[in-house]
Amino acid sequence: VPNIFCVNVHGSLLPKYRGAAPINWAIMNGDDHTGVTVMKMSSILDAGEIILQAKLAIAHDDTVVGLRLRMAQLGAVTLLEALDKIKNKAHVLKRQDLALVSYASKLTKELGHVDWKDSAVKIWNLVRGLQPWPGVSASCHGKKFKILSAEVVDFESPPDSPGIVVAVKKEGIVVSTGNQLLLITRVQPESGKPMDCAPTIFFPS
């Protein structure tokens, strides 16, 4: 039994992104910042009173893998600061605003299925936000593959039909989407190893 109360470190700026995958959803939703929250634990999931928060910028090229490491470091520092405040009775408990609550649901494989009618930015955010699991999957000529790295590009006159290979470059394959174009630069073929997206992967000689 704790002498004071139990605390928890959560990977978002509560009350935003309560739940299982706050870091993933922050990237998938295209947020430009996130953070960590040290809270007093309650019987309701991630609903405890806030003790301390720290904000962290999400870089343009951040993936979940790199962002999670930075958040873990920030979380450790923030927790120590919060514990020091509690020890010295200098902490203030702040209730969460229920009107601002949102949830970061558990990740599923279905989230990683590409819909080429989505914008290139949305697909790019999925690629960054669903690493390393479940990853973002697509297919070409009946061959399934995971998209490990991609970039949003824009041409003056992109095609009307999404999901069409519009250019083959040394950097990778350019595919049309619902808005703008996506340059796929690194993939993992089904039952294969991760590799740079050479054109021969999709168009063997």
Image: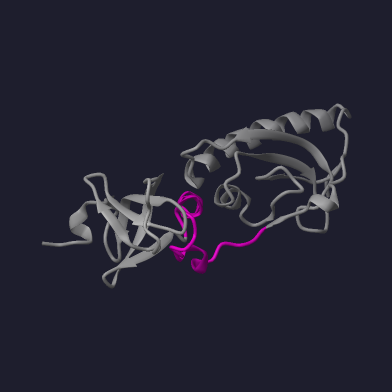
Camera-side residue of 123 and 10: 123
Question: Measuring 83% from the left and 58% from the top, which residue is drawn there?
Answer: 43
In the image, taking residue 133 as reference, residue 167 lies left or right, namely: left
Say whether residue 123 is magenta: yes
Say whether residue 153 is magenta: no
Camera-side residue of 83 and 60: 60
Locate residue 27, reporting x and y percent.
56, 47
Question: Measuring 67% from the left and 34% from the top, which residue is drawn there?
Answer: 55
Question: Measuring 73% from the left and 29% from the top, which residue is drawn there?
Answer: 81
How many callouts does the rendering have? 0
Locate residue 147, reporting x and y percent.
37, 56
* Residue most extreme to the front: 157
In the image, taking residue 124 as reference, residue 4 lies left or right, namely: right
* 114 versus 6 height, above or below: below
Q: Which residues are magenta?
A: 104-133
Camera-side residue of 135 and 160: 160
Camera-side residue of 204 and 162: 162
Locate residue 202, reporting x and y percent.
23, 61
> Based on the displayed image, in which of its 4 quarters is residue 44 positioned?
bottom right
Could you tell me which quadrant the C terminus lies in? Answer: bottom left
In the image, taking residue 131 as reference, residue 72 lies left or right, namely: right
Locate residue 47, reporting x and y percent.
80, 52
